[in-house]
């Protein structure tokens, strides 16, 4: 009885398979935040709340299983004070921007990027900023009234975020410059609005004293290996500005802050002289 041998795969098929595999390997590891809140929220008693984010989609599993999640408490007892990290290496520039209502926050996006943050030899392009209220990060257990996230990315998908904390006081000048656009979004159902040229230097990032640690995005998919820089200086913002940011998103929640996550023995650094622990 003759045994019929299967034909080996054609060379064309082999080449196609190899090309497809190489293509997927070459794609950047994307870490973008979810743009639409319809599938998650911030209500702890909801099936879509923060404690359930990791169960909603398989690709969101890090929200539940990740060991380097954000935000965290910047606990001074665990901080390693350093001076060799140096001033933040920032080179921002004006660029055209749009304001977008993402359902869970208000995002200001720079269409073509707006300069960069450099960490070691890597340049992260400033892509967007958005606000959380109250603050997501805390310092020695103290939560603040607002937190601004300036999100930077490399072409390969690496992410670095600068966080700025605010307490109620005088109005923030950068938010003041966006008031009319925020009110326009608040008074209508439009989800996106062109704002023209926006200069990120108006945010006035303080260069010297900052916390640094390795964490994650604070909304799904909770991607890890995000380099976090939290400025030591606490800024001021008015109650009306915080209220306007919440009203503009047209949701029923009074918060869009993810609960604190375990530090899990991560390295937490503070750039600055040793006396800074006694401030604030």
Image (tube, rainbow, N blue to C red):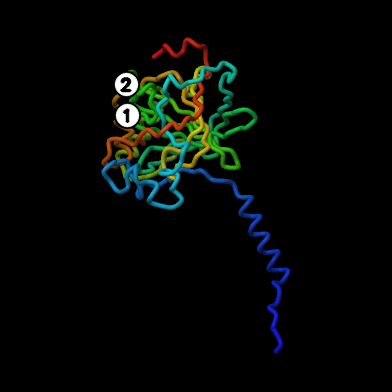
Locate residue 125, reporting x and y percent. 57, 34
**Image height of 278 relative to 259, above or below:** above
Circle 2 Cα neighbour tier, 10 Å, few/some/many (<14 / 14–19 / ≥20): some
170 vs 35, left or right, is left
Which image quadrant is residue 218 in? top left
Asked whether disc 1 touches disc 2, contact meaning CB atoms under 8 Å apart, the reply is: yes
159 vs 256, left or right, is right
The residue positioned farthest toward the top in the image shown = 275
Q: What element carries label 1?
A: helix
Which image quadrant is residue 21 in? bottom right
Instruction: Return the disc, 1 or 2, that comes first in the chain's sequence.
Output: 2
Circle 1 Cα neighbour tier, 10 Å, few/some/many (<14 / 14–19 / ≥20): many
Q: Assign the N terminus to one quadrant of the image.
A: bottom right
Residue located beneath label 1 in the image: 242
Residue located beneath label 2 in the image: 168
Locate residue 79, reporting x and y percent. 47, 21
Task: Compute the Cα span from label 1 to label 2.
Answer: 9 Å
Which of 202 and 168 lies nearest the eye of the viewer? 168
Q: Assign the C terminus to one quadrant of the image.
A: top left
């Amino acid at each position: 009885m003759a045994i019929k041998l299967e034909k080996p795969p054609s060379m064309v098929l082999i080449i196609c398979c190899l090309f497809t595999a190489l293509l997927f390997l070459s794609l950047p590891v994307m870490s973008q935040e979810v743009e639409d809140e319809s599938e998650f929220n911030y209500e702890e008693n909801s099936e879509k709340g923060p404690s359930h984010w990791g169960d909603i989609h398989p690709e969101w599993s890090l929200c539940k299983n990740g060991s380097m999640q954000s935000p965290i408490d910047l606990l001074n007892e665990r901080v390693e004070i350093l001076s060799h990290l140096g001033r933040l290496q920032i080179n921002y520039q004006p660029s055209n921007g749009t304001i977008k209502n993402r359902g869970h926050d208000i995002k200001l996006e720079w269409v073509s990027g707006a300069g960069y943050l450099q960490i070691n030899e890597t340049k992260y392009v400033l892509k967007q900023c958005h606000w959380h209220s109250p603050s997501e990060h805390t310092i020695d257990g103290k939560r603040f009234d607002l937190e601004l996230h300036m999100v930077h990315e490399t072409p390969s998908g690496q992410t670095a975020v600068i966080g700025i904390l605010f307490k109620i006081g005088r109005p923030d000048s950068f938010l003041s410059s966006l008031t009319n656009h925020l009110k326009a979004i608040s008074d209508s159902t439009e989800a996106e609005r062109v704002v023209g040229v926006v200069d990120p230097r108006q945010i006035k990032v303080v260069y010297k004293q900052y916390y640094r640690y390795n964490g994650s995005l604070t909304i799904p998919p909770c991607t890890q290996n995000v380099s976090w820089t939290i400025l030591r200086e606490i800024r001021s913002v008015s109650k009306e500005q915080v209220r306007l940011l919440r009203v503009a998103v047209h949701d029923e929640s009074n918060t869009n802050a993810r609960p604190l996550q375990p530090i899990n023995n991560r390295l937490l650094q503070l750039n600055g002289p040793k006396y800074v622990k006694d401030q604030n």
